[in-house]
Amino acid sequence: MTLTSVQRWVMSILAGSTIMHLSIGLMALAWAIDERPRQIGLWLIGTAFSFISITAALLIHQHRVLSAWLTLALIVPVAGAIVLFA
């Protein structure tokens, strides 16, 4: 592996995991709040950050954004929706 390749992997893992943690934190905050409109708002913002995290990792590796990897961004919002709305 070249130095550039290693730098891309490190940067994509750091960016993706940091932004995904933000998304998970917003889902947890939505769970802790009792007001339904605010829960939905936080859930939507968390969903957006989930997609942003995967998109950032794809862009760092210079892959096209619309790919099958983007379906990974659905894991956190689906889990959040099950916890919030069930």
Image (spheres, helix red, strand yellow):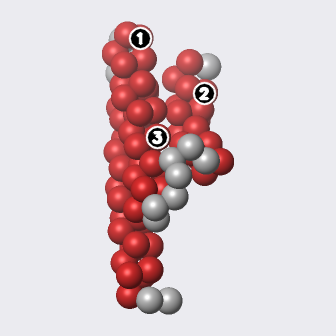
Dot 1, how many residues are within 10 Å of its Cα: few (below 14), some (14-19), or many (20+)? few
User: Circle 1 sits in a helix, a strand or a loop, which is it?
Assistant: helix
- Badge 2 vs badge 3, beta-carbon distance below 8 Å: no
Q: Which residue is mark 1?
A: 36
Q: Which residue is mark 2?
A: 82
User: Could you tell me the amino acid type at mark 3?
Assistant: Phe
Q: For residue 83, which quarter of the picture?
A: top right
Q: Which residue is mark 3?
A: 51
User: Circle 2 sits in a helix, a strand or a loop, which is it?
Assistant: helix
Q: Residue at x 61, y 47 (%)?
A: 67
Residue 61 % position (x, y): 46, 65
The residues tagged by marks 3 and 1 sit, at their Cα atoms, a distance apart of 23 Å
Q: Residue at x 35, y 59 (%)?
A: 15
The residues tagged by marks 2 and 3 sit, at their Cα atoms, a distance apart of 18 Å
Point out the tag, 3 or 1, that comes first from the N-terminus: 1
User: Could you tell me the amino acid type at mark 2?
Assistant: Ile
User: Circle 3 sits in a helix, a strand or a loop, which is it?
Assistant: helix
User: Could you tell me the amino acid type at mark 1?
Assistant: Arg
- Badge 3 vs badge 1, beta-carbon distance below 8 Å: no
Q: Is residue 76 above or below residue 32?
A: below
Q: For residue 85, which quarter of the picture?
A: top right
Dot 3, how many residues are within 10 Å of its Cα: few (below 14), some (14-19), or many (20+)? many
In the rendered image, is residue 30 in sight? no
